Amino acid sequence: MLPTQLMYNLFIPYIKSEAANGNAEAQATLKEMINTKAEWLEDLIVNESSEILRQKTRKIKICNNSVPITLVEDKDGIFDMSDMNGFGYPINVKDTGGEFRYWHPNGDERAAIRSRYSELSLCLDGEPSYAYPDLGVRSAKFFP
């Protein structure tokens, strides 16, 4: 599974570029991503409590690695590539005029999901055990 950073900073922009240049396979892939398929991403977003600091911190876990991350809290919205941090997450969201939709995390452990629909949403509001018929894993292919 791709991490969020690769999906939103590399994979989606590349497929959109190839589709705009007339690549039929890229156009079909983009259409599938928008109309029919959502997919799991590698990232988990977790809240961790520190007894020493007596506070909660939010971390992103990719495979066995975990690092602190600051996310837009308690607000859903729209964002562009220029609004992303190095991990592919928005540092701010707006109400209109963006390329991607963001659904903020609302629990202690949340899975990152690239949702379907025209905004190719980044959803952080589902649990890792979330089940949905359109949710799967894509075999990644980059076009020549």
Image (spheres, helix red, strand yellow):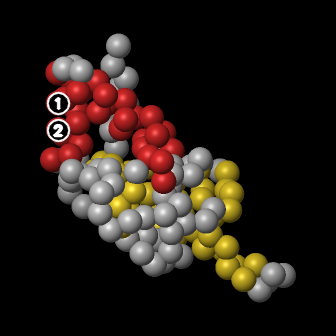
Residue 94, placed above or below residue 141: below
**Residue furthest right in the image:** 52
Identify the secondary structure beneath mark 1. Answer: helix
Q: Is residue 56 left or right of 1 when viewed as pictured?
A: right
Residue 11, placed above or below residue 104: above
Q: Residue at x 45, y 34 (%)?
A: 10
The residue that mark 2 highlights is 31
Q: Quadrant of residue 76?
A: bottom left
Residue 89, placed above or below residue 137: below
Q: Quadrant of residue 19?
A: top left
The residue that mark 1 highlights is 28
In the rendered view of the protein, which quadrant contains the N terminus? top left
Residue 127: in sight, yes or no? no
Residue 83: in sight, yes or no? yes
**Residue furthest top in the image:** 144
Q: Is residue 128 left or right of 66 when viewed as pictured?
A: left
Count of marks, rendered view = 2
**Residue furthest bottom in the image:** 54
Disc 2 marks which amino acid? Lys
Residue 55 coordinates in the image, percent (x, y): 72, 83
